[in-house]
Amino acid sequence: MGLARKSAIILSLLAFSLAGAAPAMCVQATEEAAKPLSPDDVLFVVNNIWMLVATFLVFMMHLGFATLEAGLTQAKNTVNILFKNTSIVAIGVLTYAFMGFNLMYPGSGYAGGFFGFSGFGIGTDVAGLTSAYNVGYTYWTDFLFQAMFAATSATIVSGAVAERVKLSSFLIFSAIYVATVYPIVGMWQWGGGWLNKLGFHDFAGSTIVHSVGGWAALSGVIVLGPRLGKYVNGNIRPIMGHNLPLACIGVFLLWFGWYGFNGGSVLSAAPGPVSLVFTTTTLGAASGLVAAMITTWIVHKKPDFSMVLNGALAGLVGITAGADAVTPMSSVLIGAIAGVLVVFSVMTIDKLHLDDPVGAISVHLVCGVWGTLAVGIFSPDYRFLPQLTGVMAAAAFCFSSSFLLFFVIKRLLGLRVNAHEELRGLDIGEHGMEAYSGFQVFVTQ
Amino acid sequence: MGLARKSAIILSLLAFSLAGAAPAMCVQATEEAAKPLSPDDVLFVVNNIWMLVATFLVFMMHLGFATLEAGLTQAKNTVNILFKNTSIVAIGVLTYAFMGFNLMYPGSGYAGGFFGFSGFGIGTDVAGLTSAYNVGYTYWTDFLFQAMFAATSATIVSGAVAERVKLSSFLIFSAIYVATVYPIVGMWQWGGGWLNKLGFHDFAGSTIVHSVGGWAALSGVIVLGPRLGKYVNGNIRPIMGHNLPLACIGVFLLWFGWYGFNGGSVLSAAPGPVSLVFTTTTLGAASGLVAAMITTWIVHKKPDFSMVLNGALAGLVGITAGADAVTPMSSVLIGAIAGVLVVFSVMTIDKLHLDDPVGAISVHLVCGVWGTLAVGIFSPDYRFLPQLTGVMAAAAFCFSSSFLLFFVIKRLLGLRVNAHEELRGLDIGEHGMEAYSGFQVFVTQ
Amino acid sequence: MGLARKSAIILSLLAFSLAGAAPAMCVQATEEAAKPLSPDDVLFVVNNIWMLVATFLVFMMHLGFATLEAGLTQAKNTVNILFKNTSIVAIGVLTYAFMGFNLMYPGSGYAGGFFGFSGFGIGTDVAGLTSAYNVGYTYWTDFLFQAMFAATSATIVSGAVAERVKLSSFLIFSAIYVATVYPIVGMWQWGGGWLNKLGFHDFAGSTIVHSVGGWAALSGVIVLGPRLGKYVNGNIRPIMGHNLPLACIGVFLLWFGWYGFNGGSVLSAAPGPVSLVFTTTTLGAASGLVAAMITTWIVHKKPDFSMVLNGALAGLVGITAGADAVTPMSSVLIGAIAGVLVVFSVMTIDKLHLDDPVGAISVHLVCGVWGTLAVGIFSPDYRFLPQLTGVMAAAAFCFSSSFLLFFVIKRLLGLRVNAHEELRGLDIGEHGMEAYSGFQVFVTQ
């Protein structure tokens, strides 16, 4: 079965990889590969593969966001929502390659505590394909895993501004936000910046990812205003999601992807931390779901399915900051509190006439803040004050910068579709097509 | 790119993990890590990661069950079905942490052949994060992989009692069944109990998981009775599924997750067994599908798509007991017989006026029994009699306990929604919301 | 927690695997396992697991194809489309086991440059479960990974002939094509045949998989003719897809699965190549998407969502031939050109009155050819002429053989449903069931 051929290929690939040789030097490298493998060489292979597995899991979160947001909104805006979420992945990866990665990890040469930049474009040194870059994984794995994270922050915003935001303006906002604000805040902690030095702990990004998206969601909702017909004469009119199976698929995919989001944030396949993180993540999600179920059952008399879905996400966002630093029992508590919080937060935000169609602010901002502070409460290794400082710093920088950015785009390009388009649906208005051709769908709001 | 920082993190995490140190001892552990890694250390990392990959695959089976059940039933009950299936995952994981795991693996101190219990709650010993627990993987990985299995048995029941069961009563049944009956039967085999000592072989749970769910599905269907309008004047009226793409997604996700269900049941990444299990699993599913396709084409003249979907699942359930113990050629035969069986079983169960909306009894019980017996027929290493004994023991215990449980719940709380709610749909009745807001959906049954 | 039992199981499984013993020799093998593991033994475990991960990823591409095709066509043909795509996976795996694998990898004994065959059925030698087969992975892993690829080529055809092809005729075509044409072309390159010796490079199958499917799609479209009402009096009438969320899910799943398709084609877990391939694959997809978005925005004034989806796939198909052989920056260029190409190709093919409902010819054939030629342009290690030769050879063999096969089937069995069935929908005609029972769906074309 072509055994000899395959063996030769595999050997040369391994040699290429482990010996750090450039492709053109493959033959020579094969000879070098004659020196025996060490256990550390193999561990490097394992860590790198695990980080790539985590990468494809995080990739699937973007489908999760797309289907959740589409499912919880109206049928007439579905194409537009899918379009935004699909495009953001691509735009996020490309802008991250162009500049985000180099803003987030500026390296020792450039790094200041608040800002650093190591130049446009991604590296091409072949050493980036070997352990010369990192004992855990290659340069390219590092870039790709981080790139998948980056687009997440913009996707969070997408849900909050859905059903009325102008497509082109939103894409411009996302591209700029992902290319600049997200990596700068990321550098403060993960790039070795001032928060990191302060003793702030945010394992996989309750603050650095979720609240960064959440603050922009809040400023977007304020600048945009509510959907037409949502708040009439002081009354709150519910606008129902059009496809709850799609929303359910979304939450499962997000939970699924979170095993890569949190599991990959260990930055290696080290059994203890990865197992612990999988367990706290699962228990946080499960208890968030159950807590939200009980809360909605009591508050709304009948259990609201979208609250149960948001409860699972609340638990996940809540545990993300401390998934590596709290006990499994604490993760149950942290998740449960997040599950209760999200139900009341959704109700409160609606009472404030802040129109967030999918509850993104409650899930990602409120529970992101909760999860970050919870580390200071539940983990013996971290203090409360640095956690609070990190939360406040992200708040100040992200809210103000996103507010300014939305404001400028509103003035220059307009941020909102016109009333006729909004009523008819953005699918026809922005794309000239419908999501469910052939179905009888009612488009009146 | 923060190389030094990352390296330090990775080294300390590895040290923490491999040396079995508690988080607080990280600094000290880093020093210990100076002793060189052995190949066995690295193998532990690999096995543990594979088990976690299997865990997230099994997690996705729950979305598979949710979408399959929703797709094969009526639009007016969709929210309710998604609600049940989503909640069960969370309830299953939490009850398994609270007591199920300790019932299923009571340990040498407590284990009897039929019952054992090692106390409430899950362990907190940091040795559980290292190879001190197990040469294959950590304590937490063990718990989590098993926890994902546990909820499966309740999810199987869900499909059989769909479209008329009262939400609260079903959730109570599920919680109790997953917390007690499933782990007790599981202990008989996988916890080192009497079936295990008898020479019974059930690799990944044709009996221990699928028939455990299947027997409860059968008793639930009997206690509940059929849906209104299903059997009128001795005639069988078909009630069509409302969303076959959703059902198709469900079957693919189940097949996908089965690679973790069976592949992870090897309990290590050992190449020979995992490769064999992947192959028999795939061939079993494929031949189940093709056999069901041919059978339905002959029997129904036109090939019924839901039968083809059930054929794949039948093949998967059928091969689950012996995936590690039969040749690939035998797996084709086992799958094919399961595929034929499921078509006739669905017809027979319907003729008996047992109303199982999704065919759960045929897929999980009938083919679970078949798969278990098939091990005694096709594998040279196992005998037929212990296989039959295991099937009968599970039947007696699971059918009687689930029947009793359903019966008691029916008396105390009621098990079924009222006729008006059933006709209007459980989405409005139990949740006050619709799955497809804005669509023209006909709700007459 | 049954530690001793589990340890014993794991040890014996490992022994079985690593020492290459047959199941019946387990006890003896356990003793042999006393000799210490080498790093190479562990690397074999890692490589094998990675290939199995890649296998389940490629498996999910079939759900991607199913949902994409269903979403981009009409509601009345949905069951039929899901049926085809689901069946093809099973048929593909089984025919590949029966003969495809042995045609594609005929081994040194039989291999000629153009044709070879090593007999019916798959191997049963237990050495196939160990590294005796291959330094990278077991025989069964090799078979399964390749089998998942095989069905892909038929699935590509499915989309092009959708909404009018007769079910039985299509299944016969697929079974024969997957069993013979695909593996013969595959042997030319991956089985060590004449293209391989010529210096042709097609890393994961832009030509060997995608264009093989694409040429058959083209001949199918020609032999079948367009859907009724598509081209009337020289005008092109658009027939809209009925479920764009389903199409979006499809593209994300394909992209997800592509990490296994390309990542697994490295044939090991070697960090350098796998990281590079993940990166070029991601950048190719992202830039294909963005390029198609910009192109459709300019050409169609409003950005067409299905074009954006096809843009991502175009980028993926385009980068597949050279994912291991070009720089990340080149992958951005290759993807961008594919994204532009696909938009104009879809328009051109429609102008030629070739009715391809999902754009399969543009995505898989046009971009498959582009990607193959791009290797000769962007990689310093490969020349243009062998690339062109490979493209032409696949064209000649695949187009002619598929054309002949479609033609013969058309004469013997008929290839197309009758006009009444086509207008009413193939779901009722071929299967006697509807995909969306209970919904108001308009079936006029």
Image (cartoon, coloured by chain):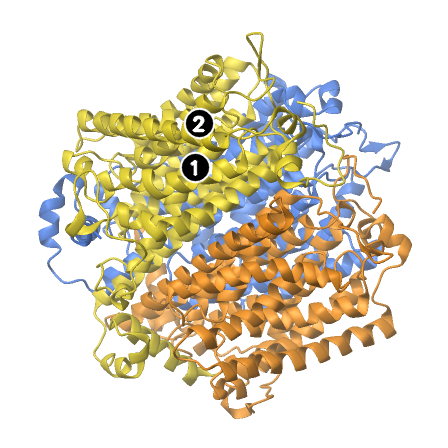
Chain colours: A blue, B orange, C yellow
Q: Which residue is mark 2?
A: C220
Q: Position of residue A299 (x, y in %)?
A: 83, 56
- Horizontal and vertical percent for residue B430? 82, 55
Identify the amino acid type marked 1: Phe
Q: Which mark is residue B162?
A: none
| Residue C364 seen in this snapshot | no
In this rendering, position of residue C235 left or right of residue C36: right
Vertical position of residue C397 compared to residue C2: above or below = above
Around disc 1, counting alpha carbons within 10 Å, would you say few (fewer than 14), some (14 to 19), or many (20 or more)?
many
- Residue B309 in percent (x, y) is at 58, 51
Where on the picture, by quarter, is residue C12?
Answer: bottom left
Does label 1 lie on the same chain as label 2? yes
Q: Which residue is mark 1?
A: C173
Return the residue nearer the eye: C195 or B117: C195
Q: Is residue C437 above or below residue B264?
A: above
| Picture residue at 35% right of the left edge, 40% below the top | C279
Q: Which amino acid is tagged 2? A: Gly
For the residues labelled 2 and 1, say whether their Cβ atoms are less than 8 Å apart.
yes
Residue C230 visible? The answer is yes
Write down the chain letter for disc 2: C
Left/right of residue C20 with respect to residue B80 in the rendered view: left
The C terminus of chain A, quarter of image: top right
Q: Nearer the viewer, residue B322 or A412?
A: B322
Q: Secondary structure at mark 1?
A: helix
